[in-house]
Image: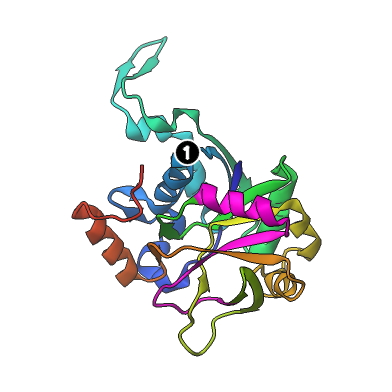
């Protein structure tokens, strides 16, 4: 399945890093967090990506345009007929990456709306460019296809401050953006959407986590695939350092490939 990843936000709470690059390019273990997310999807067999770019999107374009250059040993033949020979093979050789400029100021729902013309399938995968998990993506796909609703969100239990989900028998009955109290379940991304979600998006100002998901929840069209395992959003410098420490210690729970 195709994977749409939001990569265009400003990342203001991680200003130590995002002043110079977009948040999905902040490194964990020498590789952008975006790469880690894409490796998770590829591990489950999903290797066609649509990246919704915005803030400093040219850095993400440069990264993938020069991917072989940055990740391989090379031999350069100089002279009037120069050649470049790449010696290193890697698991990403069968990836397809669409780099889509969705605007510097576009909101999350607007970015998704701009990506939909590039989505060929009825159902597709969707997530954010700043969250790591060891979730079973194919189990979420199977669950989504079993119920026929418009959207499935992966529900997780972090020490959170994110959109709270009220869940009754597998259906999300309410979606509350950033509640005051600590929630039981939150939206961890790693969603499965039907193309019909486009009917709930109202242009560049549409914020996916507000009216669209709230309306879907109210209509019983937003289901929850609960994930009891690891999930962590990289929203602050402290969280980035925690993820870096896990990777350096060889204890990264999200490294399932």
Residue situated furthest bottom in the rendering: 180
The magenta stretch spans residue 164? yes
Residue 70 lies left or right of residue 197; in this view the side is left
Q: Describe the element under mark 1 as helix, strand or loop.
A: helix
Q: Which quarter of the figure is the N terminus placed in?
A: top right
Instruction: Give the image location of residue 64, x and y in percent.
Output: 47, 38
**Is residue 158 visible in this depiction of the protein?**
yes
Query: Which residue is situated farthest in the left direction here?
Result: 249
Residue 230 x, y percent position in the rendering = 37, 62
Residue 107 visible in the snapshot: no
Snapshot colouring: rainbow
Label 1 packing within 10 angstroms: few (<14), some (14-19), many (20+) = some
What residue is shown with label 1? Answer: 64
Q: Quadrant of residue 149?
A: bottom right
Total count of labels? 1
Identify the residue at horizontal 74%, vertical 51% (top origin): 195
Query: As rendered, which of 93 and 220 lies closer to the eye?
Result: 220
Q: Is residue 58 above or below residue 65?
A: below
Name the spot of residue 142 as percent of width and height, x first.
60, 49
Magenta segment, which residues?
137-166
- 239 to the left or right of 235: left
Query: Of 144 and 189, which appears nearest the observer?
Result: 144
- Closer-to-camera residue (190/239): 190
Where residue 70 sits, quadrant-wise, is top left
Residue that appears at 18% across and 55% down: 249
């Amino acid at each position: 399945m195709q994977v749409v990843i939001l990569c265009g936000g400003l990342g203001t709470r991680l200003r130590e890093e995002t002043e110079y690059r977009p948040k999905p390019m902040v490194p964990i273990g020498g590789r952008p967090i975006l790469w880690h997310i894409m490796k998770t999807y590829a591990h489950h067999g999903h290797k066609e990506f649509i990246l919704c770019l915005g803030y400093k999107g040219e850095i993400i374009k440069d990264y993938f345009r020069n991917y072989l250059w940055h990740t391989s040993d090379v031999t350069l033949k100089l002279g009037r007929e120069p050649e470049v020979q790449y010696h290193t093979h890697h698991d990403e050789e069968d990836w397809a990456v669409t780099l889509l400029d969705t605007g510097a100021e576009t909101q999350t729902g607007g970015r998704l709306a701009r990506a939909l013309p590039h989505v060929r399938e009825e159902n597709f995968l969707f997530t954010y460019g700043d969250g790591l998990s060891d979730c079973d993506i194919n189990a979420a796909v199977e669950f989504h296809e079993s119920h026929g609703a418009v959207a499935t969100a992966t529900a997780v239990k972090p020490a959170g401050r994110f959109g709270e989900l009220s869940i009754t028998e597998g259906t999300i009955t309410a979606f509350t953006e950033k509640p005051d109290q600590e929630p039981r379940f939150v939206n961890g991304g790693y969603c499965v959407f039907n193309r019909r979600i486009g009917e709930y998006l109202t242009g560049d100002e549409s914020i996916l986590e507000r009216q669209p998901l709230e309306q879907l929840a109210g209509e019983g069209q937003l289901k929850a695939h609960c994930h009891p395992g690891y999930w962590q959003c990289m929203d602050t410098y402290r969280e980035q350092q925690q993820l870096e420490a896990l990777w350096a210690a060889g204890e990264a729970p999200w490294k399932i490939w």
